[in-house]
Image (tube, rainbow, N blue to C red):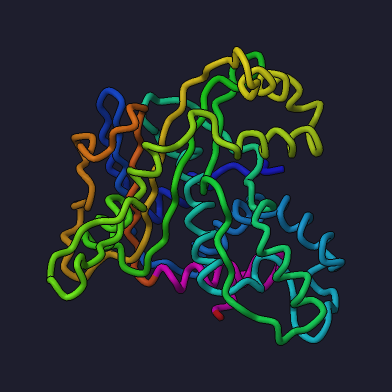
Amino acid sequence: MHTCKPPIAELNLWLSQVSTQSVGYAHLLLEEKQPSSPTIASSLRPYFESAHLDAREFFHAEAGLDLHPDAANGDVEIQYPSCLPTVTRHGLFGEVLAGLVVEAYPTVGNHTWSVPVFLFRYHADVAKYLFALSRDGTRTRQLWGRLGDDFIGVSIGAAGDVQRLIVGEAKWRKVASQTVTDDLLLGTRVEEPKGSGTFVRKHDGIWSAFQQAMPVPHGLKQLQKILIEKAPVDYAAAIVSLDAVLALRQARAIPRTDLVLIAGNSASKRIPGTSNVSQVNRPAEYTAGRDLQVVEVFLNHGENLIETLYSSLWLKGKENVTP
């Protein structure tokens, strides 16, 4: 289970924040105040280990790997998630960052969010990858992405029941430019007809995904299954309340907040304090009709932070080693 609290003091030293909020819409701008460093990676490490712990135990058991960091697992060091390809680790960073943000910063409606467990164990291609790699160290390859929503958090009431959901897309890009952000939100551009110089957008953007999304995502059922397996007593009321929410008929309706987090290095021409998504007005292209939280995170050399952080997970005493 995910039990680590966000390192608030360290986050405040590392990132500046500008939070704007109106009815049904909020924007959070986070910018580095100081360059990413091994010290920052060290302060983030407990949270990231907590976020990946459930999947780590699950994938290691599936592959027959010893959980101890010093275990000899074949000819190569195979430890989830540090042994995953770079692109996959970058994606995981964005998804964990989404949980960190909603637990640490104010969001639309000022709800209190928690992430009982991150759903990384449902990344089926990772299970296949680790199973093969543990038996043949040459079997490295890129991975298919995890199906479903990138992130799910819940708001727990005083009685322990689930009262609200936050469901989102979290993306890391090397450079979080205006063009990159537009392509993520509005859809990728394709030339039609080819050679015409005219470009149209495909319906594969985040706004389209939110429009087509079910009010109750499949990930909520996955979350309940893990709670039943790993914390049936601590989350008894939440589990029972999810039975009503997930029912096929006469289901209990609970509100859903949509979250989009885009993190990356700041473009060279970007002016500090500016964002790629309006900080005041809800984007007109978002038509799902739910509360919307947008988070933009601008770093410098963020890929170095990700590599340092993920190389240090479960290697106590080695967290300041830069890969």
Quarter holding the N terminus is: top right
Q: Position of residue 157 (x, y in %)?
A: 59, 18
From what the image shows, is residue 295 above or below residue 130? above
Left/right of residue 98 with respect to residue 2 in the rendered view: left
Q: Position of residue 262 (x, y in %)?
A: 36, 53
The quadrant holding residue 156 is top right
Could you say which is closer to the camera, residue 130 or residue 54? 130
Tell how many labels.
0
Residue at image point 60% right, 51% down: 47
From what the image shows, is residue 108 above or below residue 159? below
Could you say which is closer to the camera, residue 18 or residue 42? 18
Residue at image point 55% right, 67% down: 88
User: Looking at the image, which residue sits at the far left?
Assistant: 197
Left/right of residue 49 with respect to residue 64 in the rendered view: left
Could you say which is closer to the camera, residue 19 or residue 83? 83
From what the image shows, is residue 94 above or below residue 100? below
Q: Position of residue 115 (x, y in %)?
A: 59, 38
Residue at image point 81% right, 26% down: 233
Q: Is 308 in the magenta? A: yes
Residue at image point 55% right, 56% down: 44
The quadrant holding residue 139 is bottom right
Left/right of residue 183 with respect to residue 95 in the rendered view: left
Q: Which residues are magenta?
A: 302-322
Q: Position of residue 290 (x, y in %)?
A: 36, 27
From what the image shows, is residue 208 above or below residue 178? above
Left/right of residue 26 with respect to residue 192 in the rendered view: right
Could you say which is closer to the camera, residue 280 or residue 167? 167
Q: Is 67 in the magenta? A: no
Quarter holding the C terminus is: bottom right
